[in-house]
Image (cartoon, rainbow, N blue to C red):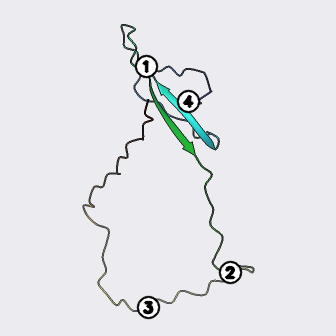
Amino acid sequence: MVSFVAGTAVKTDTPDVLVDAGLPVGRHRFQLVVMDNGGTRSQPDEIVVQIRRGVVPPVTGPVITGPVVLGPFVPGPVTGPVTGPVANPPITRPQVVQPIRRKR
């Protein structure tokens, strides 16, 4: 896992980086330069990432103030067909969102 430090290069032998999720709130600028085996460097590419603090919604439900007592289970009548898990669930893929690149 990589921890980003301002002004410090991160070098890898693979085309991916596992990022530490500990960036503080604020704007962070990342610059990528790729170097091949011959030492040729690519043009730098920059992206600005905005980290925001998550908003926690207020509690709107009842608050339990005493012990919870569960009574005996009483089965009810089955009113519809009994179904099991889906044999072949559909495969879904997350939507890919392209980053907004800063104009130079």
Query: Mark 1 highlights which residue?
Result: 13
Give the residue at the far right of this rendering.
Answer: 65
Quarter of the rendering occupied by the C terminus? top left
Of marks 3 and 4, which one's residue comes earlier in the chain? Answer: 4
- Which badge, 2 or 3, is on the more N-terminal residue? 2
Q: Is residue 91 left or right of residue 99?
A: left
Q: Nearer the viewer, residue 89 or 72?
A: 89
Q: Is residue 29 above or below residue 24?
A: above
Give the alpha-carbon distance from disc 3 to disc 1, as whole Å. 61 Å
Looking at the rendered image, the disc whose residue lies closer to the viewer, 2 or 3, is 2
Q: Which residue is mark 4?
A: 2
Q: Nearer the viewer, mark 3 or mark 1?
A: 1
Locate residue 46, reporting x and y percent. Answer: 47, 30
**Is 48 situated left or right of 13 in this image?**
right
Above or below, comparing residue 48 to residue 36 in the picture: below
Q: Nearer the viewer, residue 51 or 14?
A: 51
Mark toward the start of the polypeptide (2 vs 4)? 4
What kind of element bears circle 3? Answer: loop
The type of residue carrying mark 3 is Gly
Residue 11, given in percent of the width and then of the height, sits at: 50, 19
Under tag 1, what secondary structure? loop
Please state which of residues 39 and 71 is positioned toward the viewer in this rendering: 39
* Gap between marks 3 and 4 measured at Cα: 55 Å
Reading the image, the residue beneath label 3 is 76
Q: CA distance from mark 2 to mark 3?
A: 22 Å
Report whether 104 appears left or right of 9: left
Q: Which structural element holds mark 2?
A: loop
The residue located at (25%, 64%) in the rendering is 87
